[in-house]
Image (cartoon, rainbow, N blue to C red):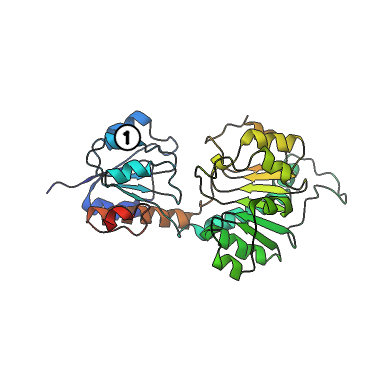
Amino acid sequence: MKKPFVFVTRQVPEEALMPLREIAHVRVWPKEEEPVPREVLLDEASRADALYTMLSDKIDEELIDQAPNLKVIANMAVGFDNIDVTAASKRQIAVCNTPDVLTETTADLTFALLMATGRRLMEAADFVKDGHWKNWSPLLLAGTDIYGKTLGIVGMGRIGVAVAKRAKGFDMNVLYYNRSRSEQGEELGAEYASFDHLVENADYIVCLTPLTDETKEMFNWDTFKKMKRSAFFINVSRGGTVDEKALEKALFEKEIAGAGLDVFQDEPISNDHPLLRFPNVVALPHIGSASKETRLAMAQLASDNIVRVVKGEKPKAMVNGEIFDH
């Protein structure tokens, strides 16, 4: 019996691929720092029974139509806005992701980014490295307190709840906005609020919402204008949730105090990106879940999802589970 063919679009830990190699022919895109070119992805997909993908891979209707053997697309991420799920479901192709395993790691990074932005840690580190520290003064690189402030979480899913847990350790007052009420969040003392009330009252606003038609550029000029001038905006969800020109304007006109950004509309960004000219912006290269332990767990779950589909079983983490139900 011919083994199925799996194409992996980036290098991942080899131990995560071992279960796949036992049941399939596996080809891994060999260039670690370079995403697979579109033409190569289309060519490999045309022969593939399974695609092991990243958020940077565009899996659209064009690609799906050219992949007659495709049974499963396993995204090594929680998000899946890079995949046309509707087109995949029409073809009975399973779309899988990797939730849960990155919750705590991403919450760690979110809170670290909040702290780095509020307390000006990156500026302070550069100040020392660049040889500018000659004397001490009371207001030298003075930042803003975190303890006792109000945190607004937009998107109270698993990661949002985990961030709220960390915030309670700092005696923060936590507001949250979500499509539905969060029982877990409210058990922690988080208070449900309207979007406007949250942005008008929070000292730190953390965006953790998925990117959808409803959330696209929800952080726009009107939103930034409603924030406190002392507020900090933190984004660890998707760059598309923010109108970056509006954020640039808000920073330039001092409508907000600063921003911590792990994601951008178009990634990667270059070092001449307009938002990087502001000293009160902390920019990271989309490393929300980037711990060795978590990336291995994500890679293993993505592999397991493919193995299960190839064996005719329902995967552990599936976006369009209704195709199995039918």
Whole-percent x and y of residue 3? 18, 47
Q: In which image quadrant can residue 271 be found?
A: top right
Residue 316, horizontal then vertical, whole percent: 34, 60
Task: Give the secondary structure at mark 1.
Answer: helix
**What residue do we see at 68% from left, 40% from top?**
222
Q: Residue 29, how many percent across, how many down?
A: 34, 38
Residue at 56% across, 54% down: 155
Comparing 191 with 208, the one in front is 191
**210 displayed left or right of 57:** right
**Camera sees residue 46:** yes
Instruction: Residue 281: tell me if it is visible.
Output: no
Q: Residue at x 31, y 46 (%)?
A: 89
Q: Quadrant of residue 8?
A: top left
The residue at the far right in this view is 137
Q: Quadrant of the C terminus?
A: bottom left
Q: Is residue 305 left or right of residue 125?
A: left
Q: Position of residue 25 (x, y in %)?
A: 23, 45
Q: Which residue is mark 1?
A: 63
Q: Is residue 1 above or below residue 317?
A: above
Q: How many numbered discs, if any?
A: 1
Above or below, 326 relative to 220 = below
Q: Could you tell me the amino acid type at mark 1?
A: Leu
Mark 1 crowd level (few <14, some 14–19, many ≥20, 10 Å Cα): some
- Looking at the image, residue 310 sits to the left or right of residue 239; the answer is left
Tell me if residue 71 comes above or below residue 60 in the rendering. Answer: below
At a point 56% along the width and 52% down the height, the residue shown is 208
Q: Residue furthest bottom?
A: 187
Say which quarter of the image contains residue 179: bottom right
